Image (cartoon, rainbow, N blue to C red):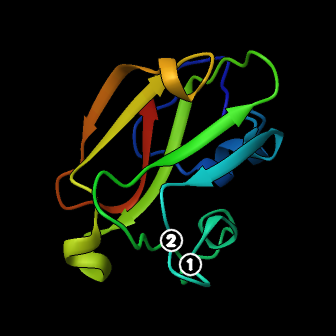
Amino acid sequence: MTTPNKTPPGADPKQLERTGTVREIGSQAVWSLSSCKPGFGVDQLRDDNLETYWQSDGSQPHLVNIQFRRKTTVKTLCIYADYKSDESYTPSKISVRVGNNFHNLQEIRVFPLVLPRKTTTFCI
């Protein structure tokens, strides 16, 4: 998502999109995963259904790679994680890395997740 102003943490991304505060830009990117179980891939990760999800099927770290076709500024990242539902599968941290290709990524932010229970909004 992109946003012209600072988005408050914990804000509802769908409400922010309806009011024009943010714009969902994930559809402009190519998404890939480090691994996934059949039926638990990118489509489930992006379908806006809180009952479906991505489930990795490989060793850590588990990665979501989002590649835009042209240089794109991303200011806000929204992730839904619910420790009560996922328990040991819930990530403990989110690392945001940027670069021109997969081989020159540099970590710019790390966000710890402590027992998340809703959509978490990160200002990058």
Residue furthest front in the image? 103
Residue 24 visible at all: no
Which residue shows up at 40% across the image and 37% down it?
9
> What amino acid does circle 2 point to?
Cys
Q: Nearer the viewer, residue 64 or 77?
A: 64
Q: Name the residue rendered at 66%, 62% in the picture.
A: 46
Q: Position of residue 84 (x, y in %)?
A: 25, 78
Quadrant of residue 38 within the rendered picture: bottom right
Q: Residues within 10 Å of mark 1 (few under 14, many from 20)?
A: some
- Residue 99 in percent (x, y) is at 55, 17
Q: Is residue 101 left or right of residue 22?
A: left
Relative vertical location of residue 115 with respect to residue 20 in this rendering, above or below: below
Q: Amino acid at mark 1?
A: Phe
Nearer to me, 35 or 122: 35
Q: Give the residue at mark 2.
A: 36
Q: Residue at x 54, y 31 (%)?
A: 76
Q: In the rendering, at what x and y percent does residue 40 appear?
A: 56, 78
Q: CA distance from mark 2 to mark 1?
A: 6 Å
Residue beneath disc 1: 40
